[in-house]
Amino acid sequence: MGKRLLLVLLTFSVLAVAGFAAPLLRATAAERTQQLVLARNADLDRFAGLADRAFGTGDATVLRAEARRYTDLYGEPLVVVDASRAPVVETGGVRASDVAGSIDKALRNEPAGSVPWLRPWSRDDLVRYRPVGDGTRVTGAVVLEASVRQATADIAAHWALIGAGALTALVVCGLLALVLARWVLRPLADLGAGVRAISAGSRRSRVPVDAGPPELREVAASFNRMSEAVAEADERQRQLVADASHQLRNPMAALRLRVDALERRITPDGERTYRSAVGEVDRLEALLDRLLALANADRAAVSGEPGDVAAAVADRVRAWRPAAEAAGLSLPDPEIPPARVALSAEELAQVLDVLLDNAVKYAPGASVEIGWDGRTLSVADTGPGLPEEEISLAAQRFWRADQHRGSRGSGLGLAIAGQLLAAHGGALRLARTAPHGLTAHLDLPEVR
C-alpha cells in the first residue's frame, strides 16, 4: 500500500509540475521568437525606407553602405532588388536567385506571415521579406536571412532554468509525498503489527494513538480499547478455567477416597464396573491437571533462567526411554550442541513431554528422531501420522483425531505446548513426515 500511495502522490506531483512547466516553456520560446521577428521586421522597415529613397533618387550608395555595415555587424545576409528583380544589394554571399521565392512574394505584396516559435534545437535561418513602396505601388523588395543561433541559445538557457526549477519542485514534492505517506501509513503499519501480535498470541497489544490523521488516531484508540477488552475477557476465561480446576480438586479427591474405599467391598460381579469407574476417575484427574496446566500456560511465560536445548532433550529422552521401549518405539540419543533459548528448563521439559507422550501413545513400533538446526527443534516419528486436513486442527483444544477418540488423553497436550511457545514469541508447527508419520517443529525464541 505504501508503494501505491507514493506512486499516486508522485504521479500527481509530476503532472502538477508539468502543468506549470510546459506553459512556461512555450511562453518563453514564443516570447523570444517574437522578439527576434520584431527586431528583424524593424530592420526590414528601415532598409525598405532606404531602398525607397534610393530608387527615388537613383543613388543607392547609402543603401549599399548600410547593408554592408549591417551584415558585418550581425552576420546576416541582405538582398535588395528593384521592381524588375534586378539586384541592387547582395551581402553575406547570398544572391537574389537564392531567395527568388521570397522576392516574388514581396513583389506581389504578400504578407510574410507568422513564424512558428523557436526551440533550442532549431537551426534553420529565418527568412523575412518586405516590399518597397508606398503600399499601392511596389518598387522593389528587401529580403533578410536572420540567424536564430542567439535566440535558440537564449531559449535553451531559459528552458534550463525552468527545468532546474521543475526538478527542484519535483524533489520537494517527492519529499513531501514521502513524509505524507509515512504520516498516513505509519499508524496503519502499527495497527497491522498489533493485529499480528494478537494473532500470534499476545494478550495485550497496544498501538500509538498520537500519529497520523485524526481518523486513524481514532481507529488506533478503538483498537487499543478492543485489545484491552479481548485481553480482559481472555483473562476471565483463563481465571475461570484455573478456578474451576482448583475447586474441582477437592470433590475429586473426596471421590477418589470413596472409590478407593469401595475396593474391598466389590463382589466379583461388580469388579468390571468398579475398574471402569476407577479409570474414569483417573481420566478426570488427568483432565483437571491438563486444564490447570493450560490455564498456567495461557497466563504468562514462566519466569526463570533460559533453558539449554541439549540438556532438556537429553533429560527427557532418558526419562521416556523405558516407556518407549515398552511400546516398541525406537528413541535414539540425538546429537544436539548446547544452545540457550528463552524457554526455561521446566517449560522445555513440559513441551517435550507432550510430544514424546504422543509418540508413545500414537506411534508404537515406530521410531522418533529429534533434530536441531540452531533455532528450530524438530521431533519426527514414523508412525501413521495424520491426514493433511487434520494437521491444522491437531493443536486445537480438546481436538482428537477420529482414529484416537477411544484412546486415553484429553486433547490438550499440543494446545498447552503451543501456548507455552507462543508466550515467549515462539511457535509450534506440525507437518507430515515422508513417507508417513508426523513432525513437530518447535520454533524456540533466542534469549534476548
Image: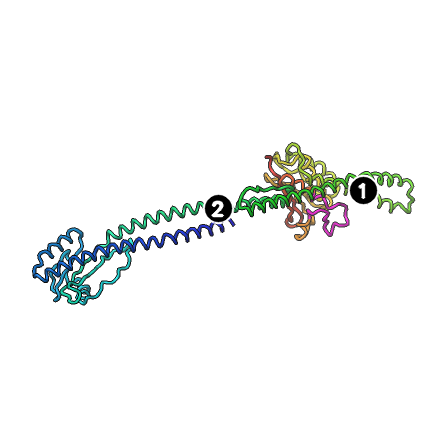
154 sits left or right of 1 in the view = left
First reached walking from the N terminus: tag 2 or tag 1: 2
Vertical comparison of 28 with 340: above or below: below
Q: Nearer the viewer, residue 146 or 124?
A: 146
Instruction: Determine if the magenta segment contains residue 410.
Output: yes
Q: Position of residue 418 (x, y in %)?
A: 67, 43
Residue at image point 38% right, 46% down: 168
- The magenta stretch spans which residues? 394-415
Q: Nearer the viewer, residue 448 or 67?
A: 67
Question: Which residue occupies the extreme left position in the image?
Answer: 58
Residue ID for mark 1 = 282
Residue ID for mark 2 = 180
Q: In terms of secondary structure, where does tag 2 sit?
A: helix
Residue at image point 13% right, 61% down: 52
Q: Position of residue 392 (x, y in %)?
A: 66, 50
241 sits left or right of 311 in the view = right
Q: Which mark is residue 149?
A: none
Residue at image point 91% right, 43% down: 266
Q: Quadrant of residue 287?
A: top right
Identity, as a three-letter code, of the amino acid under mark 1: Asp
Query: Magenta part mainly helix, strand or loop?
Result: loop
Vertical comparison of 3 with 289: above or below: below
Q: Position of residue 42 (x, y in %)?
A: 20, 56
